[in-house]
Amino acid sequence: MIEMQYKGIKFNAVIATPGCGKSYLSDRYDFVIDADELKLKNKYIIPKDITRDELEKTKGNRKFEKNKKFSYENIELLLDNYLKQNKLIIGAPHNELFNYFQKRGIKFCFVYPNKKMKRELVRRFKKRKNPKEFIKLNKKMFYKFYKSNKKETRACVCYEFGKNEYLEDILQKFGVIFK
């Protein structure tokens, strides 16, 4: 497993909120696995030729046909395999991923935006062409999400990111080398 460190605390995976660059990293680096995208592509029947922009436009309103054979246990097996291959698992703060890491004793860092990031995140969501409903919900819920994020205790360490900071920059601070 890839080992990272922040504030003297070592960990092997990252859970991060929307708008920090998870998809960007998984699109550019073979060693980065986006657990959410893995789940999405197994839960639904997604056209193979769909672009990242087209996929982003479906956030908050997935109209794909559901895969009748989907189970999260299959995702866990895929993630286990990626960890054996020394891949970096990143994902959004969904209970399944928190539970996956906890069941396996995998230490992870929780990355979330600081209190001043509301406008910046809305800008990022618009830039990546997320649906208006997704943007509206995240804008409306920002401070509630922030308060909840501040209380996160399942992660071994938390990192609050600010303006002009993306997950790639943050992971470099944690010791990840991008080639």
Image (tube, rainbow, N blue to C red):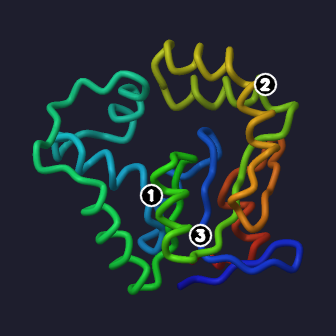
- Estimate how packed mark 3 is, as few (under 14), some (14 to 19) or many (20 or more) residues with alpha carbons within 10 Å: many
**Residue type marked 3:** Ala
User: Which is more foreground, mark 2 or mark 1?
Assistant: 2
Kindly report the distance in space between the C-alpha atoms of the residues bearing marks 1 and 3: 11 Å
Above/below status of 66 relative to 78: above
Report crowding for label 1: few under 14, some 14 to 19, many 20 or more residues within 10 A (C-alpha).
many
Amino acid, disc 1: Asp
Residue 143 circle label: 2
User: Does dot 2 land on a helix, a strand or a loop?
Assistant: helix
Residues at marks 3 and 2, CA–CA distance in whole angstroms:
25 Å
Vertical placement of 87 versus 53: above or below?
below
Q: Quick one: 174 or 150, which is closer to the camera?
A: 150
Crowding around mark 2 (Cα neighbors within 10 Å: few <14, some 14 to 19, many 20+) is some
Frontmost of labels 1 and 3 is 3
* Residue sitting at x 82%, y 49%: 160
> Residue at (23%, 53%) from the top-left corner?
71
Amino acid type at mark 2: Tyr
* Residue 18 falls left or right of residue 115: left
At 12% from the left edge and 50% from the top edge, which residue is drawn? 69
Secondary structure, mark 3, is strand
For marks 3 and 2 on the same chain, the one whose residue lies earlier in the sequence: 3
Q: Position of residue 32 (x, y in %)?
A: 48, 68
| Residue, disc 3 | 13
Q: Which residue is mark 1?
A: 34
Q: Looking at the image, is mark 1 or mark 3 earlier in the sequence? A: 3
Numbered disc 1: secondary structure:
strand
- Whole-Å distance between the Cαs marked 2 and 1? 25 Å
